[in-house]
Image (cartoon, rainbow, N blue to C red):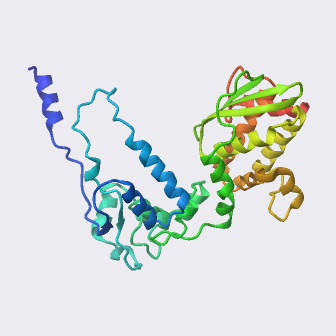
Amino acid sequence: MTSETAMLEEFVQREYEFGFVTDIEAVSIAPGLSEDVVRLISSKKNEPEWLLEWRLKAYRHWLTLKEPNWQNIKFPPIDYQASVYYSDPKQKPKLNSLDEVDPALLETYQKLDISLEEQKVLSNVAADAVFDSVSIATTLRETLEKHGVIFSPGNRQSQGGVPVLNDELRELYQEVILDHQQDPRNFGALENPTHRAEGFNPLCGDRIQLALQMNGDRIQRVMFQGTGCAISTASASMMTEALAGKTRAEAQSLSRQIRDLVTGHLPEIDDSDNVGSSQLGELRVLSRVRQFPVRVKCATLAWHTLDAALLEKSDTPVSTEHKTTFRLQKLFEEN
C-alpha cells in the first residue's frame, strides 16, 4: 500500500469530527413509520382530510419503491422503522431577552453562524426561534409570505401557534388552485396536434409542453404535460379548460387579458365584480398572484407558451427570462 493510499484509507475510516447534537427538550412520537403514524402527524397539525389522503397516497407509493443502486455506493440497509418522524420543541413561555434563551440553543446558533439578532426572531421573544420546521411557521412566517412562500390552509390551526392565513393567501390558494394542482385537467399527450410549443420558467423550474388541435381558426382540443409548482400547474389546467372552442383571436385576447391581470396592468377582480367574475370564471383567482411577484412568472408561463403555439413559434422553448417571450408579446399586440 502506497503512502497516499494509506493516508486516504486513514482519512476515510476517521470519525466525522464536526458533527454535534443539541439537547433540546421536545415532544416526540415513538420511532416507526406506518399509515397510523401518518394519520397521527396529520392530526397533530390539524390538517384537512384531503391533505391527509394526499399524504397517505404518497406513503403507499413510497412503499412500492426500491432504493437506487446506480451510484455504486455500499451501505447497510436503512431501517426506516428506527427513525422518529415527528418531534416538536416543547413550548415554553415567551421570553424577554436573549439572556433567557436556552444556552444550548444559543450555542447551536453560534456553531451554525446564525445571528438571532439579524433574523429578528427573538423580538419579545419566541423561545422556539427557528430551530425546526414547526417553528419556522411561527417566527418567520410574515417575512416568508412576502417572498411568496405559501403556508397551506391545513396549517392554520396547527399546534405551535401558527396564525390564521391572511385573506390574500386564503383567496390565492383556495380550493380552485389546490383542486387544479392535485387533479390537472387535460393533462397528458395529445395525438396529432396541429400546434405545439414548450415553455420554461428557470426561476421556479416550471416546464410545460402545450399541444393544440385546431380546426380552421378554432381550437378543438388542448392538452399539456410537464412539471411545476402549484400555481404553474393550476394556471395551465384552468387555461386548457377555458380555451376549448375559442377562436385564435379569442384565445389571444384571453391570454393578453390574463397576463395583464396577473402582472397588475388590469385591476384585481373580486367577487363583487360580477362582470369580471362571470367572464373569467375560475381564472379570476390568478389576479391574486400579483401580491407575490416571485410567482407571477409561474402563473403566466402557460399563457406565454400558448402565445408561441398560436403563432407557430415552436422551434425553441419559450422562457420567462428570454427576449423571445417579449418579442412574442409584441407580435400579439401587432396582430
Residue 118 can be seen, yes or no: no
The image position of residue 149, as x and y in percent, is: 57, 55
Q: Is residue 168 visible?
A: yes
Which corner quadrant holds the N terminus?
top left
What residue lies at 69% left-to-right and 47% top-to-bottom? Answer: 296
79 lies left or right of 209: left
Residue at the left extreme of this rendering: 1
**Residue situated in front as seen by the camera: 214 or 326:** 214
Horizontal side of residue 310 vs 178, given as left or right: right
Measured as percent of width and height from the top left, residue 203 is found at: 60, 40
Residue 109, given in percent of the width and then of the height, sits at 34, 60
Quarter of the image where the C terminus is located: top right
Residue 309, compared with residue 31, is above or below; it is above
Relative placement, left or right, of 156 versus 61 is right
The structure residue drawn at horizontal position 47% and vertical position 52%, both measured from the top left corner, is 55
Frontmost residue, 303 versus 59:
59
Number of disc labels: 0
Q: Is residue 134 left or right of residue 278?
A: left
Quarter of the image holding residue 3?
A: top left
Residue at left offset 24%, top offset 39%:
77
